Amino acid sequence: MSLLKEDLSGLKSKLENIEDEFENKLKEVENKESKFKRIDEQIEELISKKDSVIKLNIGGKIFQTKLSTLLSVQDTLFSKIITSAMDAKENISELFFDRSFTHFHIILDYLRTKRFNCRGMNKWDVDDLQLECEYYGIKEIDDILIEMQKEVEFVAFESAGRYSTAGTHEVKGLSDRSMTKGICVQSPYHIIIEMNFEHEFEKIEVGGWNGNPSLWYPGNGANAQILTSKDKKTWTDVGKLPSNLGASIQNVSLKKSTAKYIKLQHNSYVGIGYLKVHRLGSK
């Protein structure tokens, strides 16, 4: 009986401790909510009084924007500096940050529009932008970049001349498994496809164009060279299209490569109706 009392007493003590911890956490949340509400009120008051233009000296290059733009995203370095100045009743007309200005225009555009364009950026550019976003506390851009890099997308292409009316001659058609869209070209027989980021891969899925057998033979492009590049200047030979390229989608193993561009090069007509790149590490 005494052991049971001790067990119940111990259980009661644990429950009391859990209750105390819960109350403390609840108070922390309430305090944070109160703090953010106060900051929001201060920001609205400041903007309503005077939405002034602020100069930003980023590593020696001057940018200009409105106060409301810098305060448009909560809990950034900008909002912390400005709200601290407000608490101290100080006016801010210029801020200096000893950082690289190379990608700052992307950060500033995001604060203005809540959108950004990372087209043409290589892996090093993306890494640098993520570092800058971490410094300035722009978590939203960092999260978007991480998610975008998980998916391989084709964003543009260039090629030799289109063959007659074969294919839709649009890069978005390459994701259609019907293989009735896609790209078909004539001399000098090449297609260069640009991906959204540099991706590491060693396998693709590919199928020939099957839109109109009387206009185009689905096997055109069989054994074409597959080359990859990070900069569209230096190319690496990583494999070939299947010798039986045609009416079905096939898996093709390649030499492992990190690239932003894929080039199909042939000595005769080349066309693809479907293409998918399997990024290493993706499911």
Image (tube, grey):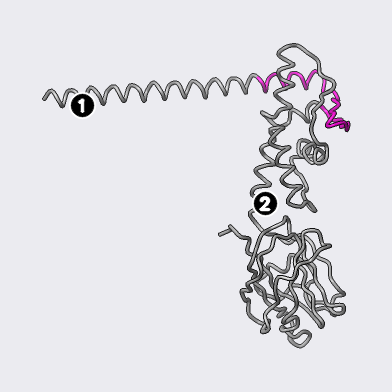
> Which residues lie in the magenta part?
39-66
Residue 281: percent from the left, percent from the top? 58, 57
- For image coordinates 80% across by 26% down, the residue present is 67
**Where's the N terminus, which quadrant?**
top left
- For image coordinates 75% across by 76% down, the residue present is 225
Q: Label 2's element?
A: helix
Residue 194: percent from the left, percent from the top? 77, 62
Residue 258: image quadrant is bottom right
Q: Which residue is mark 1?
A: 7
Classed neighbour count for the residue bearing mark 2: other residues with Cα under 10 Å, few (<14), some (14–19), many (≥20): few
| In-front residue for pair 187/110 | 187
- For image coordinates 67% across by 52% down, the residue present is 149
Q: Which residue lies most toward the top here? A: 89
In magenta stretch: residue 54: yes
Residue 244: image quadrant is bottom right
| In-front residue for pair 186/254 | 254
- Horizontal relation, residue 198 to residue 24: left or right: right
Amino acid type of the residue tagged 1 in the rendering = Asp
Classed neighbour count for the residue bearing mark 1: other residues with Cα under 10 Å, few (<14), some (14–19), many (≥20): few
- For image coordinates 87% across by 77% down, the residue present is 188
Distance from disc 2 to disc 1, alpha carbons, whole Å, reads: 53 Å
Residue 15: percent from the left, percent from the top? 31, 25
Q: Which residue is mark 2?
A: 148
Residue 193 - label: none
